[in-house]
Image: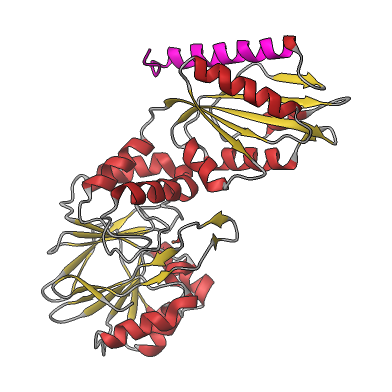
Amino acid sequence: MSFRELKPSVYYVGVVDWDRRLFDELIPLPDGTSYNAYLIKGKDKTALIDTVDPTKERELLANLRKLGVEKIDYVISNHAEQDHSGAIPTVLKAYPEAKVVTNPRCREMLMDLLLIPGDKFITVDEGDTLSLGDKTLEFIIAPWVHWPETMLTYLIEDKILFPCDFFGSHLATSDLYAVDEARVYEAAKRYYAEIMMPFRMMIQRHLEKLRFFEIEMIASSHGPLYNRPKFILDAYRDWVSDAVKNEVVIAYVSMHGSTRKMVDHLVDALIEKGVTVKPFNLTRTDIGELAISLVDAATIVIASPTVLTGPHPSALYATYLANALRPKLRFAALIGSYGWGSRMLEQIKGMLTGLKVELLEPVIVKGYPKEVDLKSLDTLANEILAKHKSLGIVER
Ligand code: FEO
């Protein structure tokens, strides 16, 4: 792909990564991704906003060449993570007069991570502006979206916000803009769940600050751009709000069918009570799907057999992730089975330190679940419904 014009003298020069299927060796990318970089040709100065993953730096340089860029004065670095900063050293080689413009914390990280010399930087702070002649960049310090050094860049004259990862989506598409909003919504929600959710409270504050900016376009650094920014701003306001939904996520694994029987029973009991249930078989599920479901859910149920006295490793992994992502869950429960002894409850409890959840009565069964055990699951379903009602989130 080549460059694309967003507004006169403002160009997309990023690269779509159609094939990438894993990020950080952790996060599934079912739809690929893109590394969006932008070039602004001012009357006097030219600025490049962010770069690309180093695996795609040749394509970035080719886009700049096709655009006829002979000189870059400023490389704006909104975020030090290498999928946006990793090509900065190559860009500095190709355009040796360029200075890297960023905040002091990001400068330090770029020096550490990419060994960029300290004298290559111009540092900026909250509200500082940088004139390109007829175009002006304003910098908004916005830590923890999703690293501590992150900032946003606002192009005043064109009312474009360049927020790097913030509002992004891992979605490879030939659409420059989010025209298929349903598809982009899912991809952006997955991105929020996996990357941004642990910083929900910080994001609430950043969203408030952005109310003071007139924004006609949001040009993030992954996925399609938003020329109807209300769409993604509204979605984020919903995701980061304190409100939870009448939803239960069941993260389960079963070895010989006992835990599976319990899950099936609980699913049916909850459905009968009008509670939305999202069961995830941890041996098959894309962990991103589990993360998405945690954005809104009021309750999580971990369901596991006992392996060597503790939970199955897949259940441990899911619990670890759920705790680390810090969703706004309000209740949690453990159900499962054992053959001769179990210390699952202590271990799972000890892993939920990042969540502000009330633990509901567990149902842990010896062997295959019997009638009395299924009744205990009915009681758990009733308790979940009652708890959800107490939050005022049950419609009927
Ligand atoms: Fe897209 Fe935090 O890097």
Q: Quadrant of ligand 1?
A: bottom left
Q: Give the quarter of the image for residue 17.
A: bottom left
- Nearer the observer, 306 or 135: 306
- Nearer the observer, 46 or 241: 241
Q: Position of residue 229 (x, y in %)?
A: 22, 50
Asked if residue 276 is positioned above or below residue 54 in the image, the reply reads above
Q: Is residue 385 magenta?
A: yes
- Residue at left offset 38%, top offset 27%: 243
Question: Please, what is the dominant secondary structure of the magenta stretch?
Answer: helix
Q: Position of residue 197 (x, y in %)?
A: 45, 43
- Residue at left offset 42%, top offset 78%: 88
Asked if residue 110 is positioned above or below residue 99 in the image, the reply reads above
Left or right placement of residue 16 versus residue 68 in this view: right
- Residue at left offset 75%, top offset 38%: 312
Asked if residue 106 is positioned above or below residue 315 in the image, the reply reads below
Left or right placement of residue 307 versus residue 230 in this view: right
The reply to whether residue 345 is in sight is no
Q: Is residue 305 magenta?
A: no
Magenta stretch, residue numbers: 373-396
The reply to whether residue 271 is in sight is yes
